[in-house]
Amino acid sequence: MEYAEAALRCGLHEIGISDHCPMPHGFDAEWRMEADELDGYLEEVQRVQAAMQPQGLIVRCGLEADFHPSATDYIQSLLTYHNWDYVIGSVHFIDDWGFDNPDEQTAWERWGINEAWCAYFDAVAASANAGLFDIIGHPDLLKKYGHKQPNHAMVHVAENRMLAAVKLANIALEISAAGLRKPIAEIYPRSSMVVKAAKLGIPFAYGSDAHAPQDVGHAMQECLQCLQQHNITHVAQFSGRKRCMQEITHVR
Ligand code: FE
């Protein structure tokens, strides 16, 4: 409820709630709800939807699903569990390396930076190819702790392959303010990826990735301006897993 109230204070017309999905076998358990908490989550979102309707705030019910090749059947079962408005597919792991976990940063010593970025983009491409998601979450999350995407031919090729997969799968990329709150202090994705995606006609959806009510709507103007600088005029919104494109000038 606090997130929806924060959205009202920001003057938003619509907010999407997308908690981290349960995963099988205790996978990354610290950062997500348990499977037996899913019904409570849905009931809570429905309560918020009912409370916000008279105030004119649309509340969408989503999920941030992890993509991991070992769990696609499990994620598929979650997708049919409820009539979600949208499902974000996020890569937080390369194999068993939780690269966005502050406790797992020493693994960079085992990876070359070019190889890590290629493996990351390959994992994001696989998430698009899985055909499970509506939005790719924070599409260059690997930079979170400051390991910027290197300007190397093999990384560009992997990035291009990933974007081609996103285009083919007809899904959206998230433009997220969360990176501004992290050591990298940069929007996800960086502007050169926005340029490439714009050329391919890949749609974007804005997300604050709020993990606290005060993050709701964070840097929305900055994210939308970044899109507009690259001649993107519309952003994606979702209802019942159907995408509709809304003019940016109507969103802000
Ligand atoms: Fe995430």
Image (spheres, rainbow, N blue to C red):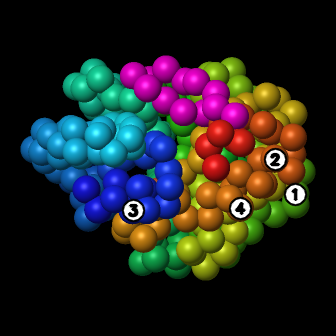
Measured as percent of width and height from the top left, residue 47 is found at 18, 43
Find the distance from the CA under tag 3 to the CA under tag 2: 25 Å
Q: Give the magenta part as a residue range.
A: 236-247
The residue that disc 2 covers is: 228
Residue in the foreground of this view, choosing between 142 and 238:
238
Q: Nearer the viewer, mark 2 or mark 1?
A: 2
Marked residue nearer the N-terminal end (2 or 4) = 4
Q: Nearer the viewer, mark 3 or mark 1?
A: 3
Q: Residue 222: give its label.
A: 4
Q: Is residue 56 left or right of residue 236?
A: left
Tally the marks. 4
Q: Is residue 193 left or right of residue 4?
A: right
Tag 1: amino acid: His
Label 4 to label 1: alpha-carbon separation: 28 Å
Question: Can you identify the residue that label 3 sits on?
Answer: 6
Tell me the element at label 1. loop
Which residue in the structure is indicated by mark 1? 152
Residue at the far front: name it: 54
Mark 3 or 2: in front is 3
Determine if the C-beta at disc 1 is less than 8 A from ligand 1: no
75 or 234, which lies in front? Answer: 234
Find the distance from the CA under tag 2 to the CA under tag 4: 10 Å
Kind of residue at badge 3: Ala
Q: Nearer the viewer, mark 4 or mark 1?
A: 4
Give the mark nearer the N terminus: 3 vs 4. Answer: 3
x and y, in percent, of residue 221 in the image:
68, 59
